[in-house]
Amino acid sequence: MDFFRAQEQAQRKTRWLLFWYVLILFSVSFIASLVLMLLMPIFSHGYLVLNSELLFTQLYTWQNWPIFAGVSAFVFAGAALNSWFKARELATGGVAIAEQLGAQRIPLNTRNPLQKRALNLVQEMAIAANMPVPQLYLLTQETAINAFAAGLYPSDAVITLTRGALERLDRNQLQGVIAHEFSHILNGDMRLNFRLIVLLHGIGFIRSIGRFMSPSRRQQARHSRAKKGQGIAAIVGLLLRLVGWLGELFSRMLQAKISREREYLADASAVQFTRNPQSIGGALKVLAHAQGRSYLTQDNLHEIAHLFFAPALSRMFSWYATHPPLDARIRRIEPNWDGVGLEGLPLEKVNTHLQQDELQSNSQLAGIQMERLQNLALLLPLLQHGLAPLSANQETQAQALLDSLQSPLDAMAMVLAVLLNKQIAPEDAAQNGSVLLKRLLVAFSASEKQLFDQTQGLAAALTQQLDCLQNFPQLNRLLLVELAMPSLKQLSAKQYQNLQTFLNAVAQFDGRSSLFESALIGLLKLYLRTDPASRREGRVQRFSAFKPEIQLLFSYLSQKIAQSALPERDYQQALASLQLHDLPLIPSVQLSEREVELSLSKLKKLAWQRKGELLQAMVELIERDGNLAATEEELILVMALTLEAPLPRFTLNAQHA
C-alpha cells in the first residue's frame, strides 16, 4: 500500500465532510446570535416593548445590524477561544490524553511477560514504520478489548492498550491491533482527530452560554431583572442549549462518519504491515464473540471515542457509531469470509504457548524479505526488521545491546556511540571502545570533558556500546537510535541538555560535517523536545514555493549520494514528477551539506501529503542506478524522520549493494 496516496484518497473523502463540519459550526453560531438578540428588550430601556407583536420586526432590522455583528463576534470569539483552550490541552501530546484516562506507562524493564510481549510488538511495528518507538500505556482497570493511539505528531505519539486487549488476545491478534494503531499514526489520523475534537469543543461554547442562563444559575446572579426579563433570559438559555445540542448532534454524526472511513483505511494498512490478514481479522473476530466486548467503563470518552480501535461506547443509532460494524470490517479484510466464527474465538485458548510465540520467527512480519531474516530465529522479533544476517556470537551481543537500551544512561551512550562510530575510518574499525573513547576525550574541550566526567557511568557505558557496535552491520545504526527513543524520553531536562552538548562535540570529532550527523542530531531534538505545542504543522501545498530548496536537495542526491553520479536527465525527470521544470542541476562543487540541512528544515513546512510525494521522488531518483544501497536507504529514512513523515521500510525497494 502506498501510505501517502492512501492518505490523500482518504483525505478527499473526508474533505467534504470537514466542509460540512465547519459549516455546522458557522450555522450554529449564526443561529445562536439570532437567539441572543432576543435579550435586547432587557437592555433596551423601553426602546423595544416586551410582548409586542412588533418585537421580531423591531429586532431583526438593518438598523440593528451593528448589534447583531457584535453579538456574532462574541459568539464566534467564544467558540474560537473554547477551541483554542482545547487545542492547547491536546497539544501537550499523547501522554496527556493517556494519563487523563488513568493509563499507566509500561516500564521498559517490566518482568510481566504479557507486557513484555506488547513492548516487543510495538518495537517491531516502529521499526517497520521507520519511526522512533512510541511509549506504551496500559489501562489497567479496563477488561474490555480496545486500544488507541494519541498525539499530534509521530514524535509525541503514544499507544494505549486496555488490560483486556493485553490478556485476551494472542500474539498475532495483538500484533494486528498495534499495527492498526501505527497505521493511524502514519495515515495522519491523529491530526485529523485533533481538528475534529477542537471544532466540536468550540460548538460546546454555545451550550455553555445556555447553561449559564438557565434558571438555577440566573437565580444566583447578583443583578436580577424584572420578572418578564427573567422569563426571556430563561427562554433564551433553553433555546441556546437546544441549538448547541443540535449542533453537537450533527457534528458528532459527521465525526462518526469520518472516523468510520479512517477505520477501514487503518485496517487495510495493518494487513500491509503484518502481511497477515488473520492478524487484524482474528482480533476483530474475538471482539465479535460478544456484543459490547470493546466498551469501556469510563464516562468521559465522548470527545475521544473515535480514537479507539473498536467502539468504546454503546451507540443507539448506526449513523452515530464511530466505527463500522465488525462484520463489515472483517469482510473488507477477508472478502470470502462466510460468516463462520463471528461468534468469536474461544477465550480459553488465547494466550497459550506464550513463550513459544515470543521466540517464533515470523518470516512475513512487516513484509521483510526472507533472505533478510536468516539466522535470527533465536532473537526477539524486533530484530527481524532491516537487519543483515548475524552470526551466533553477534546474536548474543545484539540481545545484550537491546536489553541495555532499557536504561536512559545506556540509551544516551548508544546514541553517542552511533554518531562516533559513523566517523571511524575503516583502518580504525578494529580498535576497541576504550581506545576510541580516549581519542574522543582528547578532542573534547575542557568544559565538555568536565561535564562528561561528571556524568556518572557514561564513560563505561559508552565504551561497552562502542565495543558492541563493532560487530554490527552498518545498516543497523538508525534502528538502534529508534529503539533507544523511549528511554531517551525519560531523561531529565539537565540530562537532555548534557546529551545535546555531547552530541555536538562528537559531531565535530573528525573535523568534517556530515548530513547524516546533522540529521540525526536534528531528529533527536525533534523527538525529545518537551513542548510539542510549540511546533507548527506544515500546510504548504505547492512545491513551487520551495524551488531553490528542492533544486539543491535533488542536485545533492543525484551527485553526492547516488553510488555514481546520475545524468541530468534523471534529475529532471525526478523534478518533473513534482511538476517542477527548468531548474538546472547545481554543480557538485557548489553543494554543501549545511545548505542541504537548511533546505530540509524549510521543507518541513510542506503539507503531509506533499512530504510523501517529495520522499517518493527522492527514492526514485537515487534508485535510477538500479539499486538502493544501505547508506542511501539510511539517509532517506533519517530525512523522512526529520520531516516527521515516517516512510515505512517495506515501501522501499531495497536492494542493498
Image (tube, rainbow, N blue to C red):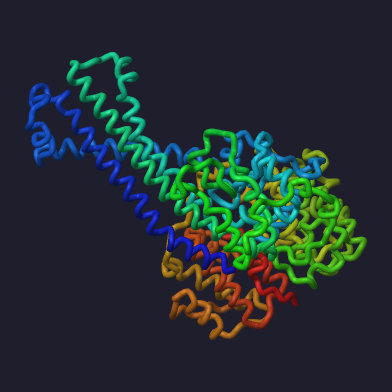
Q: Residue at x 39, y 46 (%)?
A: 251
Viewer-closest of 32 and 136: 32
Q: Is residue 437 left or right of residue 50?
A: right
Q: Please state the total of marks drawn on the protein image.
A: 0
Quarter of the figure that contains the C terminus: bottom right
Q: Is residue 25 above or below residue 563?
A: above
Q: Position of residue 75 (x, y in %)?
A: 29, 37
Among the 4 quarters of the image, the one containing residue 439: bottom right
| Relative side of 640 to 389, left or right | left
Please tell me which residue is depicted at 30% across the width and 20% down the height of the picture: 215
Which residue: 64% across, 63% down? 271
Between 432 and 651, the one lying in front of the other is: 651
User: Which quadrant is home to the N terminus?
Assistant: bottom right
Residue 472: horizontal and vertical position, in percent? 83, 63
Q: Residue at x 23, y 35 (%)?
A: 35
Where on the picture, by quarter, is residue 236? Answer: top left
Percent position of residue 68, x then y: 18, 38
Q: Is 376 in front, or is 439?
A: 376
Question: Does residue 77 lie above or below 471 as drawn?
Answer: above
Q: Position of residue 570 (x, y in %)?
A: 56, 83
Q: Image quarter for residue 515?
A: bottom right
